[in-house]
Image (spheres, grey):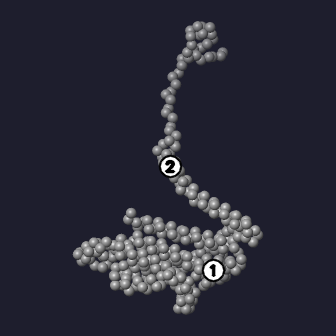
Amino acid sequence: MSAVTINEGSLEEIMQQPETVIVNSVAEPAAQPRPTPFLQTERGKALTEALAKAFRAALPPVIGIALFILLWQIVSASGGDNGLPGPVKTWQSAQQLFADPFYDRGPNDKGIGWNILHSLYRVGAGFGLAALVGIPLGFMIGRFRFLSGMTAPIISLLRPVSPLAWLPIGLYVFKETEPASLWVIFISSIWPIILNTAAGVARVPQDYLNVARVLNLSEWKIFTRILFPSVLPHLMTGIRLSIGVAWLVIVAAEMLTGGTGLGFWVWDEWNNLNVEHIIIAIFIVGFTGLLLEQGLVLLARRFSYE
């Protein structure tokens, strides 16, 4: 027997269909409110806004890098077989190079990883010595006017000297290439630390020092409570400039001294006419320098009072 469910209808229609079984309509449950789409919630809107902001920030660099690679490809293609290696060929060479970055086949044949580490060690050692000497000297030059007058002509005379001009002096004094390289980094990177630290000390408000004099504070308390917090932003700027100079100098110094390091590796690859590796070294130097600078920028923000 077929059954037809009728919820509404006229009586005549029901009577004309005696087989129809009337079933009381069952009340439908109350409709549940539909959940709000995620993108329309506060969190969704915030996420959308953040993604849009990140996209707007990333778009210009991406376009710039794409245009750079396109220009590189055009230049390499215009040179023919003897032209500059293109992006694809350089990338394939980089993959092979970094497949085993820490091999060691003797003094003059080490992986790129060892060369990067040796360069970083020299920069760290030379820059560390420059900071140990330059920071206290900068504080004293900024604090004592007589000392500032004494050192001003010497700094003005020596600061513009090319970093590589100091290398023969280092070789003559130390008789070895390793300390000579550290000497070049030290003497090249010390000037920004001294000058920025001294400038920061000179800009400390005189009222602060007058209060310290009235309170009869010791020189140590003046340094730790007044000078150091005030000079710290200038000091961090000097350190950033100094580490940049040190990283610039190391490649040239290692080209001349030999042994290990990125500079020596670049020169060795030039002797082998391996231009792809030279281009890779340029990118490594630039990328490593960028990481060092950004690390110091983050450190400077950590100590910023703004």
Please tell me whether residue 50 is drawn above or below residue 218 in the rendered image. above
- Asked which secondary structure carries label 1, the reply is helix
Residue at 58 percent of width and 16 percent of height? 6
Residue at position x 36%, y 79% in the image: 142
Residue positioned 75% across, 68% down in the render = 80
Along the horizontal axis of the image, is 103 left or right of 134?
right
Question: Where does label 1 land, which residue?
Answer: 264
Which numbered disc covers residue 49? 2
Residue 171 quadrant: bottom right
Q: Is residue 294 above or below residue 259?
A: above
Classify 24 as above or below 296.
above
Question: In the rendered view, does 82 fall on the left or right side of 132?
Answer: right
Q: Specify the farthest residue to the right.
A: 81
User: Would you call the spot at circle 1 few (<14 residues within 10 Å), some (14-19), or many (20 or more)?
Assistant: many
Three-letter residue code for mark 2? Glu
| Residue placed furthest toward the left | 214
Q: CA distance from mark 1 to mark 2?
A: 48 Å
Q: State the quadrant of the C terminus.
A: bottom left
Marks 1 & 2, CB-CB < 8 Å contact: no
Q: Amino acid at mark 1?
A: Phe
Secondary structure state at the residue bearing disc 2: helix
Residue 182 in sight:
no
Q: Position of residue 252 (x, y in %)?
A: 59, 80
